[in-house]
Amino acid sequence: MKIQRLRAENFRNLDSTVYEFAENINCIFGPNGNGKTNLLEAIYYLTNRKSFRKNTDYPQLLNIEGEKQEIYLSSSFEDDGQSVALSGKIKSESEEWYLNNQTEKPRIKAQSVFINPFDSYSFHTSSSFRRAWMDQHLGQLDKNYKSTLAKFQKALRFRNSILSQYPNSQTKLQLMSLDENFAQLSASLTQFRMEWMEKLSELIAPTFKDIFAEQHELKLSLDTKFQHWTADQIYNHYRLTENKDFEARHTSSGVHRDDCQFFFDGLNSFEFCSLGQQKMSFLSLKFAFIELFRYKLTFYPIVLIDDVSGELDSLRWKNLIQFLTQKSFQVLITTANENFRIELEKIPRVHQILIEQGRPVSQG
Ligand SMILES: Nc1ncnc2c1ncn2[C@@H]1O[C@H](COP(=O)(O)OP(=O)(O)OP(=O)(O)O)[C@@H](O)[C@H]1O
Ligand SMILES: [Mg+2]
């Protein structure tokens, strides 16, 4: 599904003018602070029903100057040659979504993936960010992963609450009984992660070579505690570490500490790579994920790219643009950088939108 039109009311600084989009590449220009990222966020919300920003909800999304306490998004999408209308009313306590003016059921097959410049740095520097990245992305691919993860997190909270108590025969018995399920969930999550991360890693190397014409070898490797362990082995591990965990008052080892790392010619990319190389690695990961998304869900997501031009040289810009023009997914790419804009304007039949103060002052 590709978005054709969007009108937003009371969404951040966007005014209610209709934005129009082409089916391939859409470039969104405009000076800093005018609404480029807000436009991507509105599309992300429409398709994924949440913001891509952390801890961002209705109060932050609602236009601070608006009088009405309601956000309204109305849009049309192209679905197999037919146009479908999707709209949503977002209020503080509830959301209502309509497809062709009827209650939306089931949800339309439209999702988007957001790529931004800051995530590359966070991905390279923070293991908790990498874990959250992995969980969010694998959850988008696999509903079973998402539900297993939710059960695991609930069990982990319960386990930690037991461990925060005094270790006696009763609390130890409680822990043993919980751990049967906890070990099962840990084994399932490990299995899911190994399977999906391997598929992702296989796609990264060719994507990296394709986009950036790099001769270096890029790999993504999962660092997991229980690789190839059975649930029984995991259960036994928790019996051996039980006293230590009671002392620490929390679960000190397990899949909640899993990690993944990039290796660039066999070397850890955070320690070895330049910022530009790290960004290329991260972009390759995102594009590999987009391919995996299509493989699993049979359709491409809408690809929202927020100014990624920083740190990349003009050759890499050209390679990235060339890569995007070869793909059949819909792209919305923003920039405030005039030189990158000149490169984007060279794309044949590109759709350009210039935003000023939340309004498309020119589009076509
Ligand atoms: N809830 C809100 N209501 C009204 N305005 C908001 C709201 N939230 C953010 N804004 C404003 O929206 C403006 C545009 O923000 P946005 O992040 O979309 O800019 P941008 O065009 O992407 O800029 P940059 O090139 O710097 O990334 C900002 O000036 C911000 O103050
Ligand atoms: Mg922005």
Image (cartoon, rainbow, N blue to C red):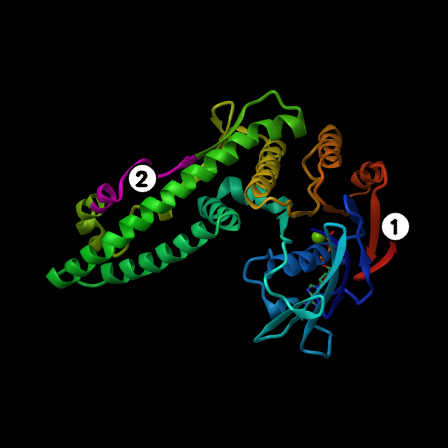
Instruction: Identify the amino acid type marked 2.
Output: Phe
- Residue 38 placement (x, y as % from top left): 71, 58
Q: Is mark 2 within 8 Å of ligand 2?
A: no
- Residue 212 placement (x, y as % from top left): 66, 28
Is 46 within the magenta? no
Can you say whether 91 is above or below 323 in the image? below
* Residue 28 placement, left or right of 114: right
Is residue 121 among what the camera can see? Answer: yes
Q: Which comes before the other along the chain, label 2 or label 1?
A: 2
Which one is nearer the viewer's eye here, 229 or 357? 229
The numbered disc on residue 226 is 2
Where disc 1 sits, the SS reads loop
Can you say whether 206 is above or below 307 in the image? above
Instruction: Identify the amino acid type marked 1.
Output: Gly
Is 226 within the magenta? yes
Residue range (magenta): 222-235
Can you say whether 349 is above or below 167 in the image? above
**Circle 1 residues within 10 Å: few <14, some 14–19, many ≥20:** few
- Residue 102 placement (x, y as % from top left): 67, 70
* Count of numbered tags: 2
Which one is nearer the viewer's eye here, 151 or 341? 151
The numbered disc on residue 364 is 1
Can you say whether 58 is above or below 266 in the image? below
Work out which residue is located at the far top of the displayed protein and give it.
215
Marks 2 and 1, how far apart in space? 53 Å
Please give the name of the residue rendered at 22% of the width and 41% of the height, measured from the top-left corner: 233
* Residue 294 placement, left or right of 354: left
Is residue 251 among what the camera can see? Answer: no
Please give the name of the residue rendered at 80% of the width and 58% of the height, measured from the top-left corner: 19
